[in-house]
Amino acid sequence: MLAKSGIAALLRGLSVCSLLFSIAANAQDDPFAEYHEMMGDDNPAIFVIEEGAELWAKPQGPKQASLEQCDLGLGAGVVKGAYAQLPSYFADTKQVMDLEGRLIYCMESLQGRDRADILRKPYSSTGDMGTELEALASYIADQSMGMPIATPQNHPAERAAYAMGEQLFFYRAGPYDFSCATCHRQSDKRIRLQNLPNLTVSAGAGSAYSTWPAYRISQGLVRTMGWRMQNCAKQQRLPQLLPGSEAVVALIEYMSVNGTGTEMAAPGLKR
Amino acid sequence: MLKTKILLAAVAVTALASAYGESGLKPDAKTVKAVWRDSMVAKNQAGLDRLNQTALEKACSNASDNVASDTEREQLRQAATNSVVYPADGKFLGDWQRGEAIASNGKGMQWSDDPNKPNGGNCYACHQMSPGEVAYGTVGPSLRNYGMRGRSEAMLKYTWAKIWNPQGYRVCSHMPRFGDAGILDEQQIRDVMAYLFDPNSPVNRK
């Protein structure tokens, strides 16, 4: 489905090699730091961003239309700065939508594509080459690079989404009694060696939100905010959380509003 | 005309707010659960019934991380204490090496996990234990040298109950109810206990 970039594949291979090399060279060293040393500030996500830009302009679906007329909140076709102002309320659907939900809507409405088809495999499995949604999210997030998070709270539905997100965040359930808050209500804590952002405060929510989507070195893939949410719910031992769903939008609303003002730095580069 | 418009807008706003509960915008627990349910699909072993909350989960789903009512908190604490099943044969300690494997294993009960394999305890996600394992989390307290605190019957029973259902000691504890929720079986808990208490366990060695 997705045009494969040979260079991206090569780079993915390289990233694995460099990781193996650094581990073999000195097991005590942080592979992430080693990776940085070898790759500099280069983020393999640049190739995924390019793929996303191509997909944005590519005619697809029964209507053979591109996504270039998709309104991401700042008007039809405006991509620059749009991601920093999502989620937001859309009059055409009378809903608050996040980027992924909005993209799915545009694929349906502009391109005439089938929702079930789009949702069949929104996120890559480890070892895959990346999905359309991942590439588009990378391209669109990159177009907000350096801009402060400015998720609007003007429409009552946007404020309601925030209030809902807060309640979802503290909802404990499942065999492990976990909520989002179990891991993300305190600062300076970690799971194994992974630092946990405190999403209830501005610094934590800002640093976390501003760096998704992110290129995950350990997976050789770009992961999106929606994937992060789905994976967190999985670790909570809950059922599968769907991209663009009301719970995902509300949780992203809660997180991004809490992180207001932090400069966007996505696609980020993560372990 | 303009007045009517403003009035209509106000009505619309009120209707929306009330859909999310009475007190301002704060949605009630029923609505919150419905949003979770409508946003998820059952997958492998993780069914939608996992969104049903126990009384404790309900009472602890708030920003304060506590149960406001003293009476309710005490009831929940007592129920948790009563839930603990101690080993019938009085044997609290198993094999520390098997316990170490359980403490290191983070799998279990996720929709991506094999339900035919035993669940892990994932102790290292949150606790420091052996000095040889540097990849430990800090959400829970360090358990380094745990066995040095003594191995009296009272200490063994306390620790067993803490693993079985930590809500008996601190209501709204973040730790899973490993015994009560059926995450680990009796023998697995014995093995984890041995990992904590055995003098030969790395937890208690330099």
Image (cartoon, rainbow, N blue to C red):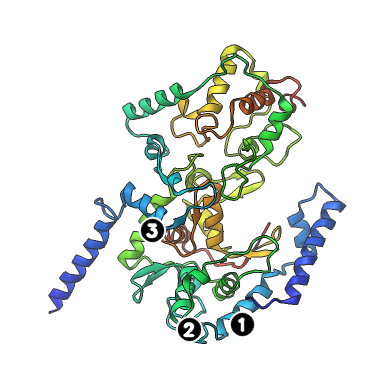
Chain letter of the residue beneath label 2 in the structure image:
A
Q: Report whether B21 appears left or right of A49.
A: left
Residue at the far right in the pictured view: A25
Residue at the far front in the pictured view: B116
Residue nearest the viewer, comparing B123 with A106:
A106
Say what amino acid the circle numbered 1 marks: Glu
Circle on res. A77: 2
Measured from the top left, where is residue B30 in percent x and y?
32, 48
Q: Earlier in the sequence, mark 3 or mark 2?
A: 2
Picture quadrant of residue B52: top left
- Per the model, the C-alpha gap separating discs 3 and 1 is 33 Å
Label 2 residue SS: loop
Asked whether the viewer can see residue A242, the reply is yes
Say what amino acid the circle numbered 2 marks: Gly
Q: Residues within 10 Å of mark 3 (few under 14, many from 20)?
A: many
Circle on res. A30: none
- Per the model, the C-alpha gap separating discs 3 and 2 is 26 Å
Above/below status of B175 relative to B41: above
Q: Which residue is mark 1?
A: A54
Chain letter of the residue beneath label 1 in the structure image:
A
